[in-house]
Image (cartoon, rainbow, N blue to C red):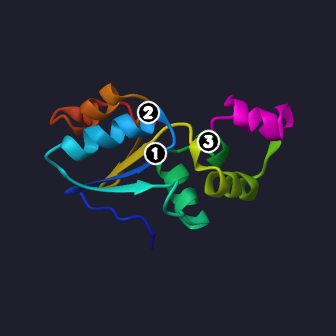
Amino acid sequence: MGTIAMDKRQITLYYSSENTIGKQIHAYVQSSKKKNLAVDISKTEVTGTQWVELADGLNKDIKDLIAMDHPDFLNVYGEQGQDLDENDCIKILQKEPHLLKHPIAVNGEKYIVLDNAASFKKFIAPDSAGLKES
């Protein structure tokens, strides 16, 4: 059994308030008419198990959730950061939440990376069944 709520009537947003896109998408989620739960990962620690579930739900590796081109990442980990294992990536996301590449929304069993505000609008649109999921 997973630790992430899978409620079709609620959008759960994982984002960092330490970056602009996270703040923008959080505002869109808050203004939507759908019930929502916002998890600001810069204030609430997401467990390793939850990071694994999020990555699995997106069909991605955990390292794909990290902005490895971010100057802070490159400053600390350099190019060899590309070779980090899953546990290292979880620790990075927990200790440096601003390195989350994009906010992640969960609605029922549907997981999506939100790379901009327009992607959230498509995510909640009634005809979003054909939307390509990441």
Residue 51, x across and y down, in percent: 56, 57
Front: mark 3 or 1? 1
The residue wearing badge 2 is 21
Residue 62 located left or right of residue 4? right
Q: Amino acid at mark 3?
A: Leu
- Going 33% across and 62% down the picture, which residue do you hit? 6
The residue under label 2 is which amino acid type? Ile
Residue sitting at x 63%, y 48% = 62
Q: Is residue 131 left or right of residue 39?
A: left
Identify the disc placed on residue 99. Answer: 3
For this rendering, which residue is in front, 15 or 20?
20
The residues colored magenta run 66-82
Give SS at disc 2.
Answer: helix
Disc 3 and disc 2: Cα gap in Å?
Answer: 12 Å
Percent coordinates x, y for residue 17 in the rendering: 46, 45
Left or right: 38, with 74 as reference point:
left
Q: Position of residue 130 (x, y in %)?
A: 27, 31
Q: Does residue 77 belong to the magenta stretch?
A: yes
Q: Characterize the local packing of mark 1: few (<14), some (14-19) or many (20 or more) Cα atoms within 10 angstroms.
A: many
User: Which label's residue is closer to the chain start, 3 or 2?
Assistant: 2
